Amino acid sequence: MSGQVSALPSVAYKVLTHQQMIELERDGVFEGAPIDLADGYIHLSSEDQLAETVAKHFAGQEGLHLVVVDLTVLGDAVKWEPSRGGQLFPHVYAPLPLSAALAYGPLERAADGSVALPIAG
């Protein structure tokens, strides 16, 4: 491998429906949305990819939640793989435990389409 590789983020984001958020809180783990189960991994987005992910896959949906995921907790289960437009996306090849959530809350969008991030605390 040659050349300099920029560091990948240690935090990523998962958009959940209201029901999926209830299940994560109740069960302490998220097994995956239908698309995750079909693909064999849980789809996450980096901060830079989040607004486009929400616009493309969740347009018009209400009651969404956003989970801030600490990728360091997930270790080798996280693989950064090319997807939309060749961008590297974080994929989790394991259930997503609530213990990996730094913060979560209702997904809020600004008029410009940007997504407000929950604050860890």
Image (cartoon, rainbow, N blue to C red):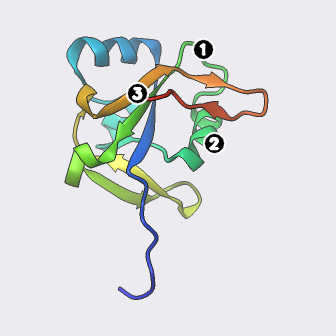
Q: Earlier in the sequence, mark 2 or mark 3?
A: 2
Check residue 62 in the rendering and tell me which mark sits there, or answer none: 1
Give the crowd class for mark 1: few <14, some 14-19, many >=20 residues within 10 Å.
Answer: few
Front residue of this view, candidates 11 and 41: 11
Report the amino acid beneath label 2. Glu
Q: Residue furthest right?
A: 111
Label 3, label 1: how many angstroms apart (C-alpha)? 20 Å
Report the amino acid beneath label 3. Ala
Residue lying at 30% horizontally and 19% vertically, measured from the top left: 24
Report the amino acid beneath label 1. Glu
Secondary structure beneath disc 3? strand
Q: Determine the image quadrant of residue 35.
A: top left
Front residue of this view, candidates 24 and 4: 4
Check residue 103 in the rendering and tell me which mark sits there, or answer none: 3
Q: Quadrant of the N terminus?
A: bottom left
Give the crowd class for mark 3: few <14, some 14-19, many >=20 residues within 10 Å.
Answer: some
Residue lying at 35% horizontally and 11% vertically, measured from the top left: 22
Residue lying at 28% horizontally and 48% vertically, measured from the top left: 72
Question: In the image, residue 69 lies at what x, y percent?
Answer: 37, 37
Left or right: 21, with 75 as reference point: right
Check residue 26 in the rendering and tell me which mark sits there, or answer none: none
Label 2, label 3: how many angstroms apart (C-alpha)? 21 Å
Residue, disc 2: 52
Secondary structure beneath disc 2? helix
Q: Is residue 93 visible?
A: no
